[in-house]
Amino acid sequence: KQEVTQIPAALSVPEGENLVLNCSFTDSAIYNLQWFRQDPGKGLTSLLLIQSSQREQTSGRLNASLDKSSGRSTLYIAASQPGDSATYLCAVSNTGGFKTIFGAGTRLFVKA
Amino acid sequence: DTEVTQTPKHLVMGMTNKKSLKCEQHMGHRAMYWYKQKAKKPPELMFVYSYEKLSINESVPSRFSPECPNSSLLNLHLHALQPEDSALYLCASSGPTVNTEAFFGQGTRLTVV
């Protein structure tokens, strides 16, 4: 059974810092891994999708890497801003690609 | 247009009521999903429709009944819910292949009284 773990559970940093969020998964037979952002009480916003054959994806200040063999992904956020404050969720898809398992998330607070 | 629209945004219902949640997307996605999310927990998959056919049911109680009338619409019919069913219900879509980005709606905040 796939299990997804995110570390740390919460993180508070001053504005401008570069930071790394970690995601690990137990079953390496994944189709893809996706990082999401969720603001309180809201839906999920897709940040980056990494296919199982890819090693990384970049979008603006965000960079996500994937090491399938070790069951790990990282989300790198450069020059953090207060507007980045949110919960970041990692999700992996396997079992035909439609069954998505989420990690518990990392709650990020960026102080101005 | 990368939007998944869910209605209503908020719903309060009694335990004897029947209500429906609606979800719509016009991205040509052929997979649509319902998730349930309790406070401070990750979303949990409930149902997956692929090409308008139910492909995954995560052992969800029968008081939740999904329906996919066409490729753009997904409904979740609710009947005889319990207070513990109160949660944020999220709809998502992806496709047409499995290796595509999933997009989520803003959710329906459901309270069962």
Image (tube, coloured by chain):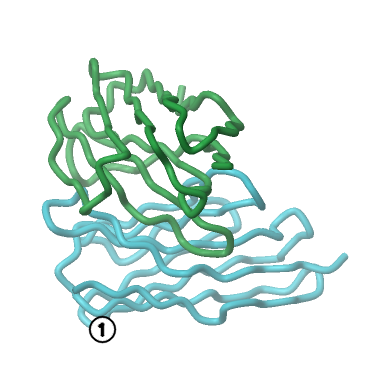
Chain colours: A cyan, B green
Residue B39 image point, x, y percent: 58, 59
Residue A26 image point, x, y percent: 25, 80
Residue A108 image point, x, y percent: 67, 68
A6 or B22, which is in the foreground?
Answer: B22
Name which residue lies at 24% across and 16% down: B69
Helix, strand or loop at label 1? It is loop
Residue at the front extreme?
Answer: B16
Against A10, residue A53 (above or below) is above
Q: Is B53 left, or right, of A109 in this rendering?
A: left
Q: Is B29 left, or right, of B50 in this rendering?
A: right
Tag 1 residue: A70
Name which residue lies at 45% across and 32% down: B16
Against B72, residue B46 (above or below) is below
Name which residue lies at 19% across and 57% down: A31
Question: In the figure, residue B62 lies in which quadrant?
Answer: top left
Assign the C terminus of chain B to one quadrant of the image: top right
Answer few, some or many: residues within 10 Å of disc 1's Cα (few below 14, many 20 plus, some between 14 and 19): few
B52 or A13, which is in the foreground?
Answer: B52
Chain of residue at mark 1 = A
Q: Is B2 left, or right, of B40 in this rendering?
A: left
A83 or B4, which is in the foreground?
Answer: B4
The three-letter code of the residue at mark 1 reads Ser
Name which residue lies at 54% across and 35% down: B14
Against B23, residue A49 (above or below) is below
Against A98, residue A5 (above or below) is below
Question: In the figure, residue B102 lies in which quadrant?
Answer: top left
Tell me how many marks there are.
1
A101 or A21, which is in the foreground?
Answer: A101
Residue B42 image point, x, y percent: 46, 61
